[in-house]
Amino acid sequence: SAAEKDGYDYFMLKEIAEQPKAVADTLLGRIDGSGVLSLDEVRISEEVLREVDKVVIVACGTAYHAGMIAKYAIEHWTRIPCETELASEFRYRDPILDRRTLVIAISQSGETMDTLMALRHAREQGAKVLAICNTNGSTIPRESDAVLYTHAGPEVAVASTKAFLTQLVACYLVALYLAQVRGNKWGDEIRDVVRELAAIGDQVRQVLGTMEPVRELARGLADKNTVLFLGRHVGYPVALEGALKLKELAYMHAEGFAAGELKHGPIALIEDDVPVVVVVPSPRGRSVLHDKIVSNIQEIRARGARTIVIAEEGDEAVVPYADHLVRIPRTPVLLQPMVSAVPLQVFACELATARGNEVDQPRNLAKSVTVE
Ligand code: G6P
């Protein structure tokens, strides 16, 4: 009913709008005033966590994209090798697991069969499993050694939005917690990140307040057949997520690519007026990547692409090559996905509406897939 949707036309719109609160709720009580994390719920002893020599993340769909992003954060902050794998592929390739492996299973519903089978396999091999889940008491957390709940509240729309952002928050909390218990160099960077994580909710709110041009752009692209997405570093999984949203909601052909791979194939797809969304890394910190992606934007534009550029405030280098420019607030490099994913959600939702699609219940999809 309209009341359940809080006056929004779709649950998806309501859930997009709830993201600042979902992020804040997921952080609540988990970091104290001096930046120390306490994850009491994670009932895996500090001793076991100190011994971990490999992290493997398993998940499906949007949760898999959160896991892909988490890999960058976990390796950067903890120096523990981390791989992220599609849950449906994981157990069929005889993965190397033992009691020093920490498997993180990410699932909004906690009922996805592929993810459940992956974690069962991991536990049989002696690995410890930590679930990151949004549904209290669901099967995946019940069968795991420990769980860190995301506090996104119930997510009704099939296409995941607020759960995704809170999965990122939870993964980052786990990464920082691992760094803390293992005594990884607790440098200024990590202290800053903890502080900036607390500011992300407000930055998401700021992005949400500037989305009208994105909606207008989406309406103008309703008769296109293809949209491509490019990103690099943590922006690469964001590009994949932007493409997934478009497939799920707009039923359009959409693909995400790592921008560095453009020259190895995908650039052949660029033709006149094909829309290409580019997620631009911060010009600070990883400036090499920034420069490289700016030349990618130049290259595709020279070949006729219509460039839709998502870039930080103050990034002036992209301006001459952006047919459409979407500004996001400055964040630390690893936190950018939490703000850059938001315009892509709004874009897909508006395109779906413009194409007359059912936003909350896309054809052929289910919110939770309980078969393998
Ligand atoms: C389904 C949904 C996706 C979701 C995936 C994983 O395919 O349509 O939106 O990302 O399952 O769901 P989970 O509940 O495990 O996060």
Image (cartoon, rainbow, N blue to C red):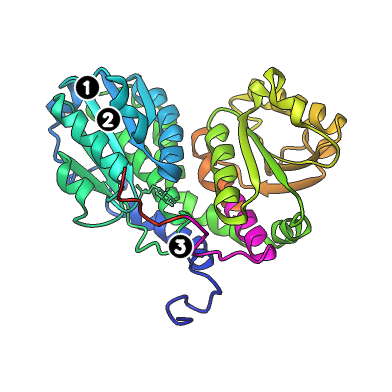
x and y, in percent, of residue 215 in the image: 70, 60
Q: Amino acid at mark 1?
A: Val
Name the side, left or right, on which 349 lies relative to 305: left
Give left or right: position of 109 versus 18.
Answer: left
Q: Position of residue 282 (x, y in %)?
A: 62, 33
- What separation in Å lies between label 1 and label 3 (alpha carbons)? 36 Å
Q: Residue at x 23, y 43 (%)?
A: 38
Identify the disc placed on residue 178.
2
Q: Residues within 10 Å of mark 2 (few under 14, many from 20)?
A: many
How far is mark 2 from mark 3, CA to CA?
33 Å
**Which amino acid lies under the numbered mark 2 shown in the image of this protein?**
Leu
Please tell me which of labels 2 and 3 falls first in the chain: 3
- Which residue: 46% across, 43% down? 196
In the rendered image, which quarter is residue 98 located in?
A: top left
Q: CA distance from mark 1 to mark 2?
A: 9 Å
Q: Say which residue appears at 22% left-offset and 46% top-offset.
A: 140
Circle 3 crowding by C-alpha within 10 Å: few under 14, some 14–19, many from 20: some
User: If the image is split into quadrants, where does the N terminus sit?
Assistant: bottom left
Residue 41 in view (yes/no): yes
- For the record, the magenta segment spans 344-364
Mark 3 lies on a secondary structure that is loop
Q: Which residue is mark 1?
A: 52
Q: Earlier in the sequence, mark 1 or mark 3?
A: 1
Marks 1 and 2 close (CB-CB < 8 Å): yes
Q: What x and y, as percent, mark residue 61? A: 44, 43
Judged from the image, the secondary structure of the residue bearing numbered disc 1 is loop
- Inspect the image, locate mark 3, and give the three-letter code of the amino acid beneath it: Ala
